[in-house]
Image: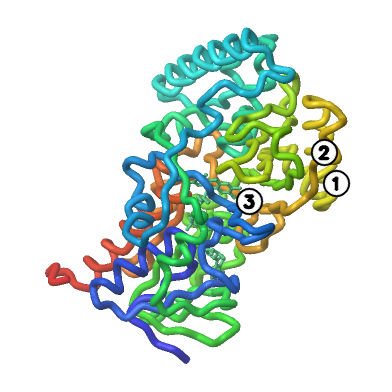
Amino acid sequence: MHDAEVVVIGAGAAGLAAARRLVDAKIRVVVIEARDRVGGRGWTRDIAGFPLDLGCGWLHSADQNEWSHIGQTLAFDIDPTPPPWGRRALEAGFAPGDQADFWAARGRFYVRLEAAAGSGIDRPASELLEPGDRWNFLLDAMSTYINGVELDQLSVIDFDRYQDTGTNWRVVKGYGALMTAYATGLDIRRDCPATVVDHSGTRLRIETPQGTITADAAVIAVPSSIIAGEMLRFSPGLPDKQNAADALPLGLADKLFLGIHDLDAFPVETRLIGAIDRAATGTYHLRPFGRPVIEGYFGGRLARELETEGEEGFARFAIDQIAERLGNGVRKQLRLIAASRWARDPFARGSYSYARVGHADARALLAAPVDGRLFFAGEACSRHDFSTAHGAYRTGLEAAEQVLKALSPVGSR
Ligand SMILES: Cc1cc2nc3c(=O)[nH]c(=O)nc-3n(C[C@H](O)[C@H](O)[C@H](O)COP(=O)(O)OP(=O)(O)OC[C@H]3O[C@@H](n4cnc5c(N)ncnc54)[C@H](O)[C@@H]3O)c2cc1C
């Protein structure tokens, strides 16, 4: 039996932010983490001689993003090169005139979407597409990258609440590596999935395969999918909390990295769209940081399908798409380095949250504390920054402030 003042469950961006704030306030904190590593959906792997982010890679809203600041403090190089999705894509199979057309259609779609959200009545974003428009497939594909789901599952009200400054930077050594560095010095029990939070007694009892931990308060910073799927249970049960988590499922986005032999065959920091006439397409970031790599991005139903094919099948799909655009000669240039399968990851079960249509307010319900001693954090709890690592961080910080208030009502900490 271990004892702590506060237990933080989950060592992702949210849990780490909460734990750090509480430790700074001299609270005795134990962090319990299901995996053998910290960072959660922030995960950098050193493969093929350089760091690759299998999870989050971009510091969105970078000019206001707390991780940018943490990176600078911990001497991590931050790269301000603008992302390729904000510029014209490679012309292969996507002529400049068509690209201009697409951007105009996208602009009109967003105007309709904003107006629809303003009406206060929620509906799927697919209802805002112009029937028969040639760019609907690509708009759908973009939604799978941004939201992890196609437009037919996207709540216009939730999507409209997302806020972004439009500045995007990267951590050269990896976003996940930055989170790992930030965790240094915290008391973290790895390989320790919490199974039950028992809040029936005067003290909380958190059950894990490594034993029970008692605590005055807990910050629950696991993905919404883990609460909805009852991999982590509450005793007594919290049906409202579970319903809120269920209304905020994780969409799916996966990455696949291909190594390149002949660097001259691929321009640096450029984007290639796999296809413009279907929603089931990858998008390919050629040579990020100038490295000999292509980072493919796949979302929604396509990503779900590709996960079932295994890494080789996944790579075949990507190489076929690239070869269709750049010619069969590129096939021999490419080899599989790594791929993610976030839906199959038992401690994520997806990539980032979206709200089911009609349930945008579930984010506030998921974030609401229970009995002044159960506090909730994680990207799905964020009203305006959901689906991001800085959104997760902010919810963790907020949960920690709530804990401090609850433990010390006179505000002495
Ligand atoms: C492919 C991909 C690309 C992305 N790209 C970006 C991007 O460019 N920019 C961006 O800002 N965001 C991006 N994201 C989203 C971002 O990674 C997440 O929003 C953020 O990392 C979530 O942090 P979190 O703390 O809420 O959850 P998590 O990172 O999932 O942390 C939760 C932790 O809880 C642990 N856990 C689960 N169950 C238990 C249990 N029972 N007991 C104990 N521990 C448990 C998990 O192992 C995990 O460590 C991306 C995500 C993916 C998958």
Kind of residue indicated by mark 2: Phe
Q: Disc 1 marks which residue?
A: 313
Q: Which residue is mark 3?
A: 350
Disc nearest the viewer among 1 and 3: 1
Marks 1/3: CA–CA distance: 20 Å
Tags 1 and 2 touching, CB below 8 Å: yes
Q: Position of residue 94 (x, y in %)?
A: 69, 17
Residue receiving disc 2 = 317
**Which numbered disc, 2 or 3, marks the residue that appears first in the sequence?**
2
Is residue 330 left or right of 372 when viewed as pictured? right
Q: CA distance from mark 2 to mark 3?
A: 21 Å
In the image, is residue 106 above or below residue 67? above
Residue 386 in sight here: no
Along the line of sight, the residue nearer the viewer: 268 or 276:
268
Residue depicted at x 59% and y 56%: 51
Disc 3: residue Cβ within 8 A of ligand 1's nearest atom = yes
Label 2 neighbourhood size at 10 Å, few (<14), some (14-19), many (20+)?
some
Q: Amino acid at mark 1?
A: Gly
Which element type, helix, strand or loop, lies under badge 2? helix
Q: Residue at x 53, y 11 (%)?
A: 104
